[in-house]
Every structure is written in structure tokens, then in C-alpha cells.
Image (cartoon, grey):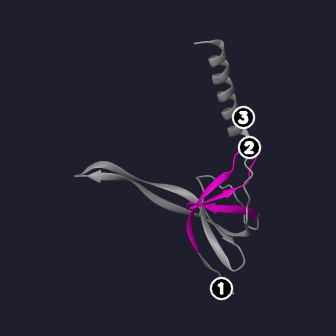
Amino acid sequence: MSFTRYLAAFLLIATFTLARDEPSKATYPENGKVVSARIASETVGSVVMGVGSVGQIKKWVYRVNCGDHYFDLQGGGKQSLQVDQALDFRIEKGKAYLPGGKKEASYRVVGMGKTDQ
């Protein structure tokens, strides 16, 4: 391989690496306030003909009031949001994305509806 091909390959890889590390210019059109936080249990595992195991995973679920509607967002095993915390976020493919430092925080949308007003 010639020097020119090596240089072209290096520049191509460098360009993709820089583009990947560049902060996204995502917009966060939804805004609301965390009104409740609870722990939900999720059953995992399987048993086939008496062999296997079943357990429970506990995850935090937050209700975010957005005025005329709400979202229930499922996080991880550690509490990451606080009640009365204001949020800006976006919903995409069943997930809520909150802006963070270099990487967005993602939460699974497990419920949504109209608020009672």
C-alpha cells in the first residue's frame, strides 16, 4: 500500500472519530418537573421444566409532570433524579433523553397520559 492510501485511511478514521466525539446538537422540546419517585420490581429469568432461576430487579420509576400530560420514566438501580427537579428532555423511540456532560442520560418510557386538571 502506498503512503497516500495510508494517509487517506488515517484521515478518514480521524474524521469519524472527531465527528463521533462532537457533542450532539439535539434539542429538548419537552420540559417538566419530577413529581414522584418510586421503586418498581421487574421479574427476570426463566424456568423450563423445573430448571432455571427467577429473580427480581429493582429500578427507579419517576413521574414527570409536563403540564397537560405526564411521562413515567424508568431509570436504573440507583436514584438519579430528585422530586421537584426540573427537566428538559426529548422522547425518541420509547426512550427519554436528558442532556448531560458528554453523554445524554437515557430513561425508558414506561407510561404516559393526560394529567387530571
* Label 2 Cα crowd, 10 Å radius (few <14 / some 14-19 / many 20+): few
Quadrant showing the N terminus: top right
Q: Which residue is mark 2?
A: 102
Q: Is residue 33 left or right of residue 109?
A: right
| SS for callout 1 | loop
Q: Which residues are magenta?
A: 87-112
Give residue 24's position: percent from left, percent from top: 72, 48
The quarter of the picture where the C terminus appears is bottom right
In 3D space, how far apart are the residues under numbered discs 1 and 2 (Cα atoms)? 37 Å
Residue hosting label 3: 18
Q: Residue at x 70, y 59 (%)?
A: 81
* Amino acid type, mark 3: Leu
The residue to which callout 1 is attached is 116
- Please name which of the two marks, 1 or 2, marks the residue nearer to the observer: 2
* Marks 3 and 1, the one that precedes in the sequence: 3
Disc nearer the start of the sequence (1/2): 2
Q: Quadrant of residue 107?
A: bottom right
